[in-house]
Amino acid sequence: MNIYETDQLLAEYLLFHYGEDHEILPWPFGPAAALHYPVRCVTECFDLKRLPAIARALDLGCAVGRSTFELARHCHEVVGIDYSQRFVTAANELRDKRELPYLRRDEGDLATPLVARVPAGIECHRVHFERGDALGLREDLGAFNAVLMANLIDRLQEPRRLFARLPSMINRGGQLVIASPYTWLPEFTPRENWLGGFEHEGERRTTRKALQSLLEPDFELIKSSDQPFLIREHGRKFQWSVAETTTWLRR
């Protein structure tokens, strides 16, 4: 079974995207700077002042949609696409009802009922969610002023196929934000398709260098940052990771 279709992963991502600080991290000594990652991917990674008054945005690999909703604060239309039908169904319910109950896993079979909520001030009618494959996006998707790909590229079988299409999907002057911890694993991406994380002829190949090679003919790198994130598995087990984020301007 695809792990992204399970109850456990759905609940983990609803908490990751919508959980209150104390619901995710109850201890004052925890890594609080890693909270609010889906929001930071929008507010800290895009140059929001560059967006036109009427802008289209794409959140590719949107999971349960928090970044998609945050983009709707700044864009007239936002499309969120994810490969997981469970994630897309949950995101659509949040769009329609603005809230969704779920169970947070605490210990073993013990759980706490919580509710994911779309924050106030977001106009949900601007948002559309659909299931889709990043390597086979529909041809009539159109072009965008802002594209976010958070924690996506190292989960694709052939990431270079997506990069080949990106220039036609982003308007001139538009922005592309890529956020990833670069966790290359053969169960998701065959080794021969990794963008980085290996040696070739004695040279260390990093994902950052590969991104520059793939994007610089059509994009200019305008900023980068390190963004931590925290995914709670249960009451005493967490995934703490650091994504490198790069922001690219379409030439």
Image (tube, helix red, strand yellow):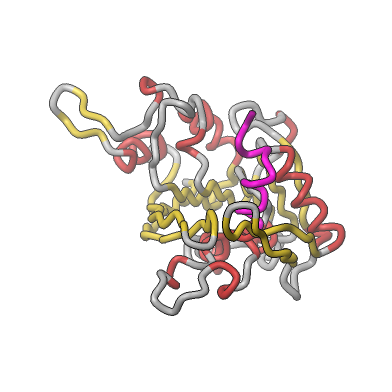
Answer left or right for 83 relative to 25: right
- Is residue 58 covered in magenta? no
**Nearer to us in this view, 192 or 23:** 23
Q: Where is residue 3, by image quadrant?
A: top right
What residue is drawn where x is 41% and y is 39%? 215
In the image, what residue occupies the spot 42% across and 22% down?
Answer: 190
Q: Position of residue 64 (x, y in %)?
A: 68, 51
Figure check: 139 above or below 56: above
As drawn, 80 above or below 202: below
**Residue at position x 76%, y 47% from top?**
129
Chief secondary structure of the magenta portion:
helix
In the picture, residue 130 is in which quadrant?
A: top right
Residue at 62%, 46% in the rendered image: 9
The one nearer the camera, 219 or 29, is 29
Residue 43 in sight from this viewpoint = no
Q: Is residue 211 visible?
A: yes
Give how far across and how far down residue 72 sits, in percent: 70, 62
The stretch of residues the image draws in magenta is: 1-14
Q: Is residue 3 magenta?
A: yes
Q: Residue furthest bottom?
A: 28
